[in-house]
Amino acid sequence: MERWRGRVALVTGASVGIGAAVAVELVRLSMKVVGCARDVGKLQKLAAECQSAGHPGVLVPFKCDLTKEEEILSMFATIKEQHKGVDVCINNAGLAHAEALLNGKASGWKNMWDVNVLALCICAREAYQSMKERNVDDGHIININSVCGHQVFPNADGHFYTCTKYAVTALTEGLRQELRVENTHIRATSISPSFVETEFVSRLYRDNSDKSLEAKDLVSAITYVLSAPPHVQAPVVPFYKRPTGQQGMPMKTL
């Protein structure tokens, strides 16, 4: 992680859960982290905690509603003005509503699509343009996906959410192909965890505590792909909680 010291990472959905854990770890590793969320109060509290802990990096809170493209563009413009640009973009923000396909509300479907797919696309596009205009050739775009992006589980309430995560799988591969055509070493990675012990999962799925990963497991996966040498591609990283008694990091790279 030495090459990332002092460089800028954008983490979406950074106020709670996985996003908060990732933001704090990157600050601990000396990065300048722009954490965005709608609840800027939680971000400010997190930034103060990082400062009190003596972490060498800094967490910059930014209020942003990812369902509004103009707010995303304004955020990137501010990052450019104040911090030059984005070197790492971690598309962590995501949400799920219990809206089945046969009787769900279109408003819930649209909200999931806007956050889980369109906001991710806009952030990835703007992050790449930021890297390109500064001749950054070792940047990284990391999309927090899900095993639901690779398998449809028999849970009606989660089927549209699953649709959005299949889109993330396709979009990450599309990004990787387009980056290759551009002859750049900027990388795109999709990290697909199984259940993670957060409020997000508990709202959609029940009785999965014995199968759940923790946010710190996602942090390990993200620092793993960021620390890989520039010539190493890690396009898809799925990982699961190992059965009790097994040792080792609960992930593998394809």
Image (cartoon, rainbow, N blue to C red):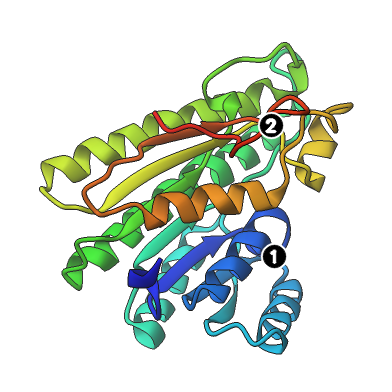
Q: Which of the two labelled residues, at mark 2 and mark 1, occupies the earlier sequence position?
A: 1
Q: Tell me if I can see residue 253 in this picture.
A: yes
Task: Name the spot of residue 43 as percent of width and height, x first.
Answer: 69, 74
| Residue under pointer 2 | 241
Q: Position of residue 212 (x, y in %)?
A: 76, 35
Amino acid type indicated by mark 1: Ser
* Mark 2 crowdedness (10 Å alpha carbons): few <14, some 14-19, many ≥20: some
Residue 210 vs 78, above or below: the answer is: above
Residue 197 in percent (x, y) is at: 78, 42
Q: How many numbered discs, if any?
A: 2
Viewer-nearest residue: 248 or 156: 248
Q: Quadrant of the N terminus?
A: bottom left
CA–CA distance in space, label 2 to label 1: 24 Å
Residue 150, x across and y down, in percent: 52, 21
Helix, strand or loop at mark 1: loop
Q: Which residue: 36% across, 85% down?
A: 81
Q: Please state if 65 lies on the left or on the right of 9 as rendered.
A: right
Foreground residue, 215 or 122? 215
Name the residue located 33 percent from the left edge and 75 percent from the top edge. 85
Q: Residue at x 25, y 54 (%)?
A: 230
**Farthest residue in the right direction?**
207
Image mark for residue 15: 1
Q: Is residue 93 visible?
A: no
Q: Quadrant of residue 213?
A: top right
Front residue of this view, candidates 69 and 228: 228
